[in-house]
Image (spheres, rainbow, N blue to C red):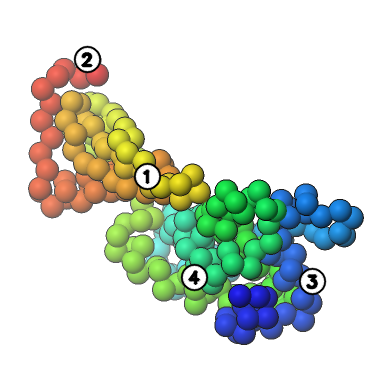
Amino acid sequence: MDLQQLQQQHDLHFHDQGLLEQALTHRSFLNEQEDSGLRDNERLEFLGDAVLDFVITRVLFARFPEMPEGDLTRLRAALVRTDTLADVAANLQLGEVLRMGRGEELTGGRQRRNLLCDAFEALLGALYLDQGLETAAAFVVPLLMPMVDYILAEGLHIDARSKLQEWSQAVHTVTPIYVVTDEEGPDHEKEFTVEVIIGDQVVGHGQGRSKQLAAQSAARNVLKLLEAGELTVQLTSPAGDL
């Protein structure tokens, strides 16, 4: 895929093709070019991040007029986090057209999630400069807002670790412990498995593309079991021994 095909496939029509090229240029590419006059996408990423936050904030504010500020903040965070944006970027096939150094490419750069996320934000920043806020919004909102119902249904906007810790300390006066039990995949696409231990009892497991996401998944799974009455936590060791 080239930049022209990318634009045709996703109904993008850049007036300034240079902005599009910059948005899809990783700094490692410049390291291998002598006196190219090119720029990397980091400034556009910075701009796109701000545009994204504003656009999503505006849409959520209008869609959920009764939702408290804290819940809106957490829902926005779930929508614009690295994993979500990397999935969107992968679906757009940005990795295929991202310009990067050979070393970066050989180590899996085209699939690296933080690079995909950065490229998506840079693309949004470039679109904003090229055609304005409403065009940028018209591009990004249909990509992200269909995920809202799923995020709410699965509780992905909730800080599950904090919620589980509050419950565990209130009921058992202990803090949950999270242990990485497995990791699979190449460095750029790791999948971690984490188990939750309350007292001396393993109460649940979770998977994710980072240790933090796996821990959140594990805590979320435990909370679901507790809410359904399908998990009983019984401590056999005194709290002071933990």
Report x, y in % for residue 194. 31, 39
Alpha-carbon distance for marks 2 and 3? Answer: 63 Å
Residue 241, disc: 2
For badge 2, the amino acid type reads: Asp
Dividing the picture into quadrants, the one containing residue 147 is: bottom left
Is residue 114 visible from the viewing direction of this image? Answer: no
Question: Considering the numbered disc 1 on the image, is that residue within a helix, a strand or a loop?
Answer: strand
Q: How many marks?
A: 4
In the rendered image, residue 84, in percent from the top left (x then y), is placed at 47, 60
Residue corresponding to mark 3: 18
The CA span between labels 1 and 2 is 33 Å
Q: Amino acid at mark 3?
A: Gly
As drawn, the label of residue 184 is 1
Q: Disc 1 to disc 4, how far (Cα)?
A: 23 Å
Mark 1 vs 2, N-terminal side: 1
Foreground: disc 1 or disc 4: 1
